[in-house]
Amino acid sequence: RVKDATRRSDEPPTGLVRIAAEHEVIAGSNCVIASTKYEAEDLLSHYGADPTRLCISPPGVNHDVFRPGDRSMARRSVDLPADVPVVLFVGRIQALKGIDVAIEAFAEVHHKLPDARLVVVGGPSGPRGTEEAARVVARVERAELPVRFVDPVPHEDLAVFYQASDVVVFPSRSESFGLVAAEAQACGIPVVAARAGGLVHAVSDGRSGILVDGWEPTDYAAALLEVLTDPEVACRLGDGAVEFARQFSWDATATRLLELYAGITGRS
């Protein structure tokens, strides 16, 4: 139901069987863990979750892996030029993740910065993922945009792609948290993301990145260009990203989950 509220107009609504199953799971659980207060509010308003069984515990980031690195070295590792602006998109290729918005926004960025590159790390996902990927590739080829598609890589290998980029674009239409945003920021990379769902919690607007209202490509392009063309903004947001991401740790998440499980078993 949350995804349906912001789905792209040409995407079909979620089936009633799934919605019924989600209701049943939430109603029958001793504890429902939301990633952020925004997801908790969605569970309350869309699914009638019992507030006494609703807890909040955000995911974490492995800071031993996702940390600032040498950009030149990272670019050599992933075969990117050292002296061009690089925008990174990481995620499943499907309408939900806003890959279409990212491509259109980059087309505007490329018009202003002809040497800019976009790297897309991820593969088709979901029943219409292959169709979405074909549409995106066709758009890139028609416009002759310098976009590099990279198949999904092992999770820990994503760090070098973050470190090689100047900014990460994350125009997801629905996100319970936004782990990509947290990991990118832990690597010192500003994030331009949708002001949607958990991304409002995962990105600090004006401090670690820029949140954009809606899914108009021009608005994302403007935010990306602000980071790519103003070294002072890029530096400020990069430093803020590292600081802000420190709150997302697996140690804190694990401790919180243990506390929740102890509470559940204690009531049993």
Image (cartoon, grey):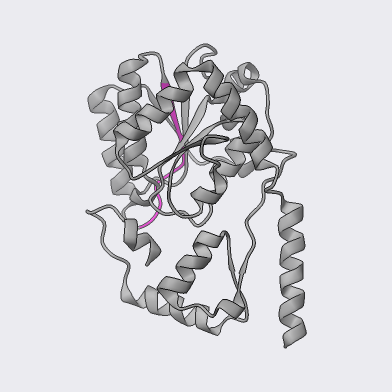
Point 34% across, 20% down: residue: 110
How far across and down, in percent of the image, does residue 76 sit?
Answer: 59, 18
215 shown above or below 69: below
Can you give x and y, in whole percent of width and height, for residue 244 in the image?
65, 40
Q: Which residue lies furthest to the front in this view?
A: 206
- Is residue 191 shown left or right of residue 154? left
Q: How many marks?
A: 0
Residue range corresponding to the magenta coloring: 117-126
- In the rendered image, residue 266, in percent from the top left (x then y), is placed at 77, 83
Look at the image and say whether residue 13 sits in the magenta stretch. Answer: no
192 lies left or right of 110: right
Instruction: Name which residue lies at 73% across and 63% down.
Output: 256
Location of residue 215 by image quarter:
top left
Q: In which quarter of the image is the C terminus?
A: bottom right
Using the image as rendered, state which of residue 106 and residue 37 is in the foreground: 37
Q: In which quarter of the image is the N terminus?
A: bottom left
Can see residue 98? yes
Q: Splitting the image into 4 quarters, where does residue 101 fall?
A: top left
